[in-house]
Image (cartoon, grey):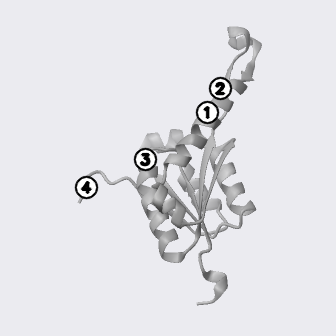
Amino acid sequence: MSNSTLIHKILFATDFSDPSENARKYACELANRTGAELHLLHVVVPLAVPAMGAPSVGYIEDTEGIAASVKQSESDLEKLLDPAWRSAHRVVSAVVVGTPVFEILKYAKDHHINMIVMGTYGRTGLTHLLMGSVAENVVRKAHCPVLTVHQPKHSL
């Protein structure tokens, strides 16, 4: 196996959901086995609120709400890993604001990520059609392999 095919940087993209928690275990195990640097990423989706309380006037970004979400997400990322595990591995944490698919792909490219690990809800049918899938779009557009981890319906 040539050095160019080894995994040096793993991106774990999380929304702090149960499927993400399951995927975190895989990301940590892969980082542990490969010695790769583990990047933890959370994307805060900016919400717009009606301006002056009237939707017909337009919408504005809730900058205070976004700032609070970023701060909370940074704190949550710090608590995501066991401190002993974190201190024994190379870990980078980042919180960005934007559209999840775009921001995950941009981060992966900008940081030369070799593999992306993320959870998936496994939605099907109308729910999938209406909501789409961040994981599915990342898989389709990523420059590197993507491991999607589905939340099991029951434990083994």
* Mark carried by residue 123: 3
Identify the amino acid type marked 2: Gly
Element under disc 2: helix
Residue at horizontal 47%, vertical 62%? 85
- Residue 58: x and y, percent? 75, 17
Q: Residue furthest left?
A: 156
Q: Is label 2 in contact with label 1 (beta carbons under 8 Å)?
A: yes
Which residue is drawn at the image coordinates 50% and 47% (left, top)? 79
Give the mark, 1 or 3, whose residue is nearer the N terminus. 1
Choose mark 1 or mark 4, whichever is in front.
1
- Mark carried by residue 69: 1
Give the mark, 2 or 3, whose residue is nearer the N terminus.
2
The amino acid marked with disc number 4 is Ser
Marked residue nearer the N-terminal end (1 or 4): 1
Query: At label 3, which amino acid type do we have?
Result: Arg
CA distance separating discs 1 and 3: 26 Å
Q: Nearer the viewer, residue 39 or 132?
A: 39
Residue wearing tag 2: 65
Q: CA distance from mark 3 to mark 4?
A: 19 Å
- Quadrant of the image containing the N terminus: bottom right
Q: What element does badge 4 sit on?
A: loop
Q: Say what amino acid the circle numbered 1 marks.
A: Ser
Residue, far bottom: 1
> How many neighbours does mark 4 have within 10 angstroms: few (below 14), some (14-19), or many (20 or more)?
few
Q: Mark 3: which secondary structure?
A: loop
